[in-house]
Structure formats: C-alpha cells, structure tokens
Amino acid sequence: MKKIIDIWKAGFAWGRGLHREAALDSLRNVLAIVGGATILADFATIKLWLILPMLVVAFLIWFLDYDRHFRGQTVDEAKS
C-alpha cells in the first residue's frame, strides 16, 4: 500500500510542475478526440480489459500534444 501511495504522490508532484495553460489546451484536444470517438463507437460493447489500454493511449496523446507546446508545431518553429 505504501508503494501505491508513493507512486500517487510522485504523479501529483509531476502534475504540479506542468505548465497550466499548455496542459489545459492539450486536455481540450484529447477530450475532442474522445468525443469524436464516442460518436463513432458503440461503448456498450467495450470489453472491460480494454479500458486500461485506452487510458494509456489517451494519456500518450495528451502528453505528446502537451510536449508540442514547447517544441513548436512544425519543424521550422522547433528550430527557431
């Protein structure tokens, strides 16, 4: 149990160090993707074991979009 609490604390500390505006913009983008997927998919047939991989993919999309704010949207912007 202590290890789970330590992991939670580390995640919370990491989250506090994020740039607020960039994180919220990335969250809006991910929620737009999830909203589009909700319209296209029938979630009544989803398997329970797929939830965790779906959350991992959503986090990966969010993190890559969040990282985009600091690297530039294009190669030219990232180089300057």
Image: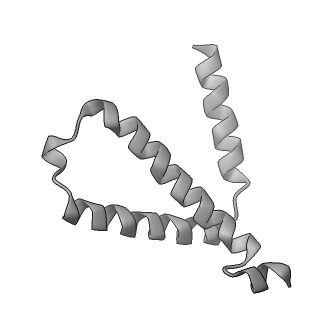
**How many numbered marks have been drawn onto this rendered protein structure?**
0
Whole-percent x, y for residue 10 in the image: 69, 35
| Screen quadrant of the C terminus | bottom right
Q: Is residue 55 left or right of residue 35?
A: right
Q: Is residue 73 left or right of residue 30?
A: right
Question: Residue 11 sits in which quadrant?
Answer: top right
Whole-percent x, y for residue 50 in the image: 33, 37
Whole-percent x, y for residue 49 in the image: 32, 30
**Residue name at image x 20 percent, y 57 percent:** 41
**Residue name at image x 66 percent, y 79 percent:** 73
- Name the residue furthest top: 1
- Name the residue furthest front: 75
Of residue 21 and residue 53, the one placed in the foreground of this image is: 53
Question: Residue 52 sits in which quadrant?
Answer: top left
Whole-percent x, y for residue 14 in the image: 70, 46
Q: Is residue 26 above or below residue 60?
A: below
Of residue 80 and residue 23, the one placed in the foreground of this image is: 80
**Residue name at image x 75 percent, y 72 percent:** 71
- Way the structure is coloured: one colour
**Residue name at image x 34 percent, y 38 percent:** 51
Q: Is residue 39 above or below residue 12?
A: below
| Screen quadrant of the N terminus | top right
